[in-house]
Amino acid sequence: MPIVDFTAERLALLNERGMQITSLRGPQNFRAPAVLEPPGFIGAEIVFNRPFRMGAFSLLMGGLIQSATIGRYCSIARDAQIGHGAHPTDWLSVSPLQYHCNYHGWEDFVARQGYPVHPSPNLYDPFLPTVIGNDVWMGNHVFVKCGVTIGDGAIIGAFSVVTKDVPPYMIVAGNPARIVRPRFPEKTVERLLRLKWWRYAIPNLPRLPYQDAERAVDQLEKLIETGGVREYSPEPIRFPDFFETPSAPPAV
């Protein structure tokens, strides 16, 4: 399993590629690939022993995130908790010892005490992938259960506990999170989902009336029809391969 030490030099190298990361320090154990689409900002703790993907122009301000796919233009506030592992509720116990071989070395410890040990088969995956669409805003202290899908354009109110899928362009809040209202009328949502405006880089677009979603969609549709704008396709940053390139310091 590759281990990468996130030194100041490596963080600077990432910054040159448009990916500003303030939360990573010291060695990180990469058990699964991670793909980052620049530019972006990561101020959250990312657990790299599970697959992780983040789209361009997204902000992860804080919290702990793992086993997640996050789309473009997402704004995730501080102290978000996303994709934490679950526990079985209908087994004999909720303990990971039932399905996680040698969990924290406890089987070895029991064996050293002179007890026979019978390793349990790995029958349960506690980390279902969590999918967060594009243009999603999460407030402070949001908790998202692993395996949940949050649709494009959704807004999650602060301190919400999301245990079920959230439809696109819905505003939800509470514990458990419930639908408050849609962001836009149904026909506008249909246009937005058909347009998929996040395929484009906002800095590359002419000045659109962003404060009026309908007018902005009208103008962007015309731009696309006339070939006046092209989709944004940056070269992704792939961990840990990024640190194996000749231009980067060698991996530890």
Image (cartoon, rainbow, N blue to C red):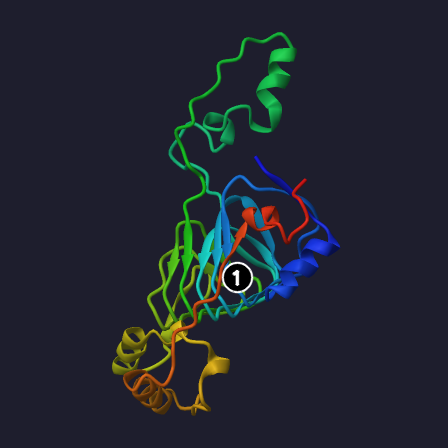
**Quarter of the rendering containing residue 165:** bottom left
| Above/below status of 82 relative to 127 | below
Tell which of 242 and 147 is nearer to you: 242
Q: Is residue 128 above or below residue 163?
A: above
- Image quarter in which the N terminus is found: top right
Frontmost residue, 112 versus 212 = 212
Left or right of residue 84, residue 90 in this image: left
Q: Where the C terminus falls, by quadrant? A: top right
Q: Which residue is labeled 1 in the image? A: 142
Q: Specify whether 144 is left or right of 240.
A: left
Residue 31: percent from left, percent from top: 53, 39
Q: Secondary structure at mark 1?
A: loop
Where residue 195 appears, x then y in whole percent? Answer: 31, 77
Place of residue 183 in the rendered image (x, y in percent of width and height, measured from the top left): 37, 79
Report x, y in % for residue 232: 43, 72
- Residue at point 49%, 51% (across, down): 52
When asked about the image quadrant of residue 126, the answer is top left
Label 1 neighbourhood size at 10 Å, few (<14), some (14-19), many (20+)?
many
Is residue 251 toward the left or the right of residue 169 in the image? Answer: right
- The residue shown at (50%, 24%) is 101
211 shown above or below 120: below
Q: Residue at (60%, 64%) from the top-left corner?
A: 17
Q: Amino acid at mark 1?
A: Val
